[in-house]
Image (tube, rainbow, N blue to C red):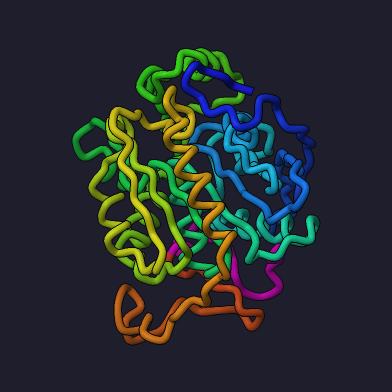
Amino acid sequence: MLQTADSVQPSSTARPVRESEFVSHDGTRLFYRAWPATGAAPKGAIILLHRGHEHSGRVAHLPAELGLDDFAFYAWDARGHGRSPGERGYSPSFAASARDLDCFVRHVSETSGTAVEDIAVIAQSVGAVLATTWVHDYAPPIRALVLASPAFSVKLYVPFAKEGIALWEKLKGTFFVNSYVKARFLTHDPERIASYESDPLITRPIASNILVQLYEAAARVVDDARAITVPTQMLISGSDWVVRHAPQHRFYENLGSRIKERHVLAGFYHDTLGEKDRAIALAEIRRFIDARFAEPQAPADLRTAHYSGLYQGRGRPAREPSGRHIPTAVSTGRSAVSTSGSARWC
């Protein structure tokens, strides 16, 4: 377990962990880690989603440091990352990755006997955009959502880089873009910096189709955040070199959740949950999660959802007969996941 002078220490020893796999919608077996609850009265499950380029090992300090002993924790290696298969940094589409997440949550629920209503999600950076896309498109009845520095708009530092990547991808097909962000711009924690620089599972490239579709999905969920009613906490790093602040604030202001919080963490770099002073962020998360599980879950009020947002006057995206959303807005184009015929959901 990572320790610094300023880290929270509600639990002084690492929690036992097991490693496993689940089968996603296309038959791909994706790797994950699981930490069983250690408290006397288990309350639910918390799913951790890592940053872009990273893997579940980079969030392995959180189950112990959060001190939520009555909760089991689960963290995957997203497709193309860490110990999961696939070309590094690649997924067939952002929609395919959102569908992977839906399968992962269903797997956790079914294998642990935990109702989806008793699951919370804590996600960071690109993982936070994936989580919001999934919550928006699939409308899962999870108990809470925590977003740390969501990558709704990445600072590429090259004029017209986003437009250039989209054009080249359209003309030439998928290619890969390397991240040159230095670890010292992600966190002030010297141990996190050193481990990032030496970690062989860090994935520097990201596929152009995912980068383009990340931007498209982010813009869509920010504009239509009113459709999201899950209790949501946002943690915004105040000195973030990687993502822009404005879309994060706009998402929060548009958010339809009756219960929502926003915390700007002064001086924090992008790795919010791996910062030297992350005790501040983790204390806010712990309080928020405890509060959500201490109160009855309020049903979402969608009676007026069709009067605002992207789907005004035409309802939500199409659903399968089972009730699952078909995420049409993020699964268009040549790399889209098929949602027709005999497609396997999970």
Query: At x 33% / y 36%, what residue is drawn?
Result: 265
Looking at the image, residue 91 lies above or below residue 8: below
Q: Is residue 237 visible?
A: yes
When the figure is inspected, residue 277 is found, relative to residue 318, above or below; the finding is: above
Residue 68 horizontal side relative to residue 209, left or right: right
Find residue 75 and report its image quarter. top right
**Quarter assignment of residue 162:** top left
Residue 126 against residue 229 in the figure, above or below: above
The quarter of the image holding the C terminus is bottom right
Residue 132 x/y as whole percent: 45, 57
Q: Residue at x 51, y 24 (%)?
A: 7
Residue 244 lies in what quarter of the image?
top left
Left/right placement of residue 201 relative to residue 288 reads: right
Residue at x 44%, y 79% (from the top left corner) = 316
Residue 174 in view (yes/no): no
Q: Is residue 323 above or below residue 219?
A: below
Asked if the stretch drawn in magenta spans residue 299, the answer is no
Pinpoint residue 39: horizontal percent, then vertical percent: 74, 44
Residue range highlighted in magenta = 330-346
What residue lies at 32% left-to-right and 81% top-to-bottom?
A: 312
Q: Does the stretch in magenta take in 335?
A: yes
Q: In front: 23, or 122?
A: 122
Q: Position of residue 59 (x, y in %)?
A: 58, 33
**Most foreground residue, 300 or 42:** 42
Pick whichever, 147 or 335, lies toward us. Answer: 147
Prevailing SS of the magenta stretch: loop
Q: Quadrant of the N terminus?
A: top right
How many numbered markers are drawn? Answer: 0
x and y, in percent, of residue 63 in the image:
64, 37
Of residue 76 and residue 97, the one placed in the foreground of this image is: 76
